[in-house]
Image (cartoon, grey):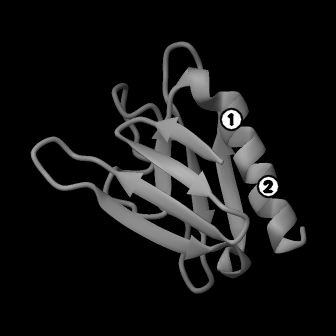
């Protein structure tokens, strides 16, 4: 299952979560997380005015702090490897992906 985000994608194959981030002028960066290693997920649905985000929390790491300000809309910074901003059209897809990850974790 693959969901398009803002400047990237999130994929889940039943065991591995792959977050691919694209930045203008750079090669795409890929971050792989094993679903069994994830201790929590955070999902903030997007609105028509602001992007939302999905974030995966790993053991020993605190969730990234949401940026404040009008343009960031309360999302983690783009440099956080375990999160991705999502547009409004991806809300349903990302909710299904998060549910699949939670099911794979046994929660």
How many labels were placed on the picture? 2
Name the outermost residue toward the top.
48
Give SS at disc 2: helix
Residue 16: give x, y in percent of width and height. 62, 70
Q: Which mark is residue 104?
A: none
Looking at the image, which is closer to me, 89 or 73?
A: 89
Residue 61: give x, y in percent of width and height. 54, 79
Report the residue at 59% width, 45% height from top.
2
First-in-chain label (2 vs 1): 1
The residue identified by callout 1 is 93
CA–CA distance in space, label 2 to label 1: 11 Å
Q: Is residue 37 above or below residue 21?
A: below
Q: Locate the C terminus and report the quarter of the image it occupies.
A: bottom right
Name the side, left or right, on which 84 lies relative to 101: left
Q: Is residue 46 visible?
A: no
The residue identified by callout 2 is 100
Q: Quadrant of residue 31?
A: bottom left
Report the residue at 50% width, 37% height from top.
4
Residue 18: give x, y in percent of width and height. 51, 62
Q: Quadrant of residue 29?
A: bottom left
Name the side, left or right, on which 4 lies relative to 38: left
Report the residue at 47% width, 40% height from top.
85
Name the outermost residue toward the right.
107
Give SS at disc 1: helix
Q: Quadrant of residue 80?
A: bottom left
């Amino acid at each position: 299952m693959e969901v398009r985000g803002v400047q990237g994608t999130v994929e889940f194959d039943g065991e591995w979560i792959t977050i691919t981030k694209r930045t203008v002028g750079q090669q795409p960066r890929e971050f792989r997380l094993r679903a069994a290693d994830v201790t929590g997920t955070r999902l903030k649905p997007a609105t028509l005015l602001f992007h939302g985000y999905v974030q995966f929390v790993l053991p020993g790491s605190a969730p990234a702090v949401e940026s404040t300000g009008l343009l960031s809309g309360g999302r983690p910074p783009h440099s956080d490897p375990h999160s991705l901003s999502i547009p409004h059209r991806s809300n349903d897809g990302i909710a299904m992906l998060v549910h699949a990850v939670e099911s794979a974790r046994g929660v």
